[in-house]
Image (cartoon, rainbow, N blue to C red):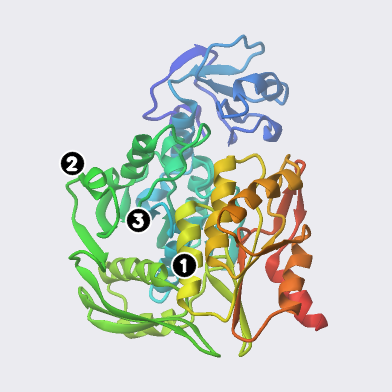
């Protein structure tokens, strides 16, 4: 493609070289540069892409995009922009031919519930349309699953796979839109047909995430500024901030406050064959549903999806059938459901998610709630104290084990969690090896127990000293039952 075409509608200054050239591809990782590529120097939290320009030039990058002046040798074309993150999004959009303009796009944001809600929406839309998904569990369309590192991938990856989906006759795409994705311009340039809010609390406030709550909410609000219509949880906090000066068609759902789709009644169900809920709605949809995912907050996620589906006019009878069997990997996923006990895998990390998770499980009145969990390394200590106190207060037995220790010692991480456990006089044991911890819980179960595996969810690795080692809780369970 001609460089001038890739640069369309971007404000830039030509520092050196020619614009009348062909380029092969766009890269922001200098290790992946091939001859005639554009290299975009991104400033990250830990690394500055400008430091790797010599490597990019050595690998024969044709164009270098910068946002700060540096000494650059060689014959590459040098272009200065205000923000290379924003430039990457616009370059990618041009390079892949604006696929976003030809797809029906649904963006889902919120403190919790994004992953579950996007999967429910995708599965229900697929009853009528060909639908793809971009989010925490990867990029999914047809039989393709491409794993990603972030809730919302970088802008190049988003536009690349929107183009792939379009080329494979996908018509609708659901995107999990994190607050970070707006801060880092990953979704820049996209107008969503429907923007969705699951809920809002305080979260992701740290030096490497958001400076304060105001910035967090401002980033969330970006989705609704760039959506044609909005679906929103009318029971959520901070709606006055999110909706201020937003003049878009609005559909609401909820239980506590008046809403277009109102939760009329619900019942939590836990028997030998099923754990989930039965609920009925009024207003936008008047019907009764059974949901094979535990908890009131999953009913909220289903209500959200139903609002989106109402806008797309999908058969309510088919929706009812699908909700009976729908599951999301690693999100309140009941992977063992037998007459004696149940095993549920969930990815919860945030305080709000953890509180809802353990409280919900107690609402199902298990004989015992057995919680298996650890803490992430190189993370805030206060989160670890909260992890111990929240889970410990609602569990009959905690099994403290390994999560992703990263570059910290496991003993140190668990010592912090124990402080939280001791604050609430929790009953706990410590089994460092996560596989052994799961085996112990299964070996020592009692009839009516719920065994809760917290923190890993869909992940298939443990991050230890800079290396990722294969670990899947689902695989551990399969192995256990194959041998017992």
* Label 3 packing within 10 angstroms: few (<14), some (14-19), many (20+): many
Picture disc at residue 199: 3
Q: Quadrant of residue 256?
A: bottom left
Query: Which dot, 3 or 2, sits closer to the camera?
Result: 3
Task: Give the residue drawn at x 57%, y 81%.
Answer: 367
Looking at marks 1 and 3 on the same chain, the residue that comes earlier in the sequence is marked by 3
User: Which is nearer the eye, 275 or 341?
Assistant: 341
Label 1–label 2 contact, CB within 8 A:
no
Name the residue at the right extreme.
483
Look at the numbered discs 1 and 3 and tell me whether their residues touch, using CB distance below 8 Å. no
Q: CA distance from mark 1 to mark 2?
A: 36 Å
Instruction: Return the x and y of residue 23 as percentages of the image width and height.
Output: 57, 31
How far apart are the two marked residues, 1 and 3, measured between alpha carbons?
Answer: 18 Å
| Spatial separation of the CA atoms under disc 3 and disc 2 | 19 Å
Q: Is residue 439 above or below residue 91?
A: below
Quadrant showing the C terminus: bottom right
Answer with mark 3 or mark 2, whichever residue precedes in sequence: 3
The residue that disc 2 covers is: 245
Q: In the image, residue 207 lies at what x, y percent?
A: 51, 31
Q: Is residue 372 above or below residue 343?
A: above
Figure quadrant of residue 329: bottom right
Q: Give the labeled residue for mark 1.
A: 359
* Mark 1 burial class by Cα count in 10 Å: few <14, some 14-19, many 20+: some
Residue under the image location 33 percent in, 80 percent down: 266
Q: Is residue 70 left or right of residue 124?
A: right
Towards the viewer: 180 or 159 = 180
In the picture, measured across the screen, residue 316 lies left or right of residue 145, that is: left
Viewer-side label of 1, 3: 1
């Amino acid at each position: 493609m001609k460089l001038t075409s890739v640069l369309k509608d971007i404000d830039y200054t030509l520092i050196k070289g020619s614009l009348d050239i062909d380029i092969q591809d766009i890269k922001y990782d200098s290790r992946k540069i091939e001859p005639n590529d554009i290299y975009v120097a991104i400033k990250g939290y830990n690394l500055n892409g400008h430091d790797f320009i010599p490597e990019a030039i050595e690998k024969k990058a044709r164009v270098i995009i910068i946002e700060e002046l540096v000494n650059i040798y060689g014959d590459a074309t040098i272009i200065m922009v205000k923000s290379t993150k924003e430039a990457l999004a616009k370059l990618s959009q041009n390079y892949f031919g604006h696929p976003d303009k030809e797809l029906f796009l649904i963006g889902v944001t919120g403190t919790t519930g994004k992953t579950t809600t996007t999967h429910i929406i995708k599965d229900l839309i697929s009853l009528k349309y060909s639908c793809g998904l971009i989010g925490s569990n990867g990029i999914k369309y047809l039989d393709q699953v491409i794993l990603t590192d972030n809730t919302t991938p970088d802008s190049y990856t988003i536009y690349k796979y929107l183009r792939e989906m379009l080329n494979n006759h996908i018509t609708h795409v659901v995107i999990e839109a994190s607050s970070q994705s707006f801060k880092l311009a990953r979704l820049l340039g996209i107008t969503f047909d429907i923007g969705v809010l699951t809920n809002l609390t305080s979260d992701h406030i740290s030096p490497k995430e958001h400076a304060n709550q105001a910035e967090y909410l401002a980033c969330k609000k970006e989705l609704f500024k760039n959506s044609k219509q909005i679906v929103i949880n009318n029971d959520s906090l901070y709606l006055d901030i999110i909706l201020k000066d937003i003049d878009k068609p609005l559909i609401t759902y909820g239980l506590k406050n008046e809403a277009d789709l109102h939760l009329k009644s619900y019942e939590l169900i836990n028997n030998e064959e099923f754990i989930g809920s039965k609920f009925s709605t009024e207003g936008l949809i008047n019907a009764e549903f059974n949901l094979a995912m535990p908890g009131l907050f999953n009913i909220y996620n289903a209500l959200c999806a139903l609002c989106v589906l109402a806008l797309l006019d999908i058969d309510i009878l088919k929706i009812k059938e699908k909700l009976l069997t729908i599951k999301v990997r690693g999100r309140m996923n009941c992977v063992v459901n037998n007459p004696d006990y149940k095993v549920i895998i969930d990815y919860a990390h945030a305080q709000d998610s953890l509180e809802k998770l353990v409280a919900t499980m107690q609402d199902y009145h298990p004989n015992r709630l057995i919680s298996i969990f650890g803490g992430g390394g190189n993370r805030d200590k206060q989160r670890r104290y909260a992890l111990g106190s929240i889970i410990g207060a609602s569990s009959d037995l905690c099994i403290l084990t390994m999560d992703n220790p990263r570059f910290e010692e496991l003993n140190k991480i668990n010592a912090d969690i124990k402080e939280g456990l001791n604050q609430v006089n929790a009953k706990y044991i410590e089994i460092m090896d996560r596989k052994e911890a799961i085996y112990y819980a299964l070996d020592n179960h009692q009839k009516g127990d719920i065994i809760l595996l917290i923190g890993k969810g869909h992940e298939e690795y443990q991050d230890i000293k800079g290396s990722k080692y294969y670990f899947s809780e689902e695989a551990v369970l399969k192995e256990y039952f194959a041998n017992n």
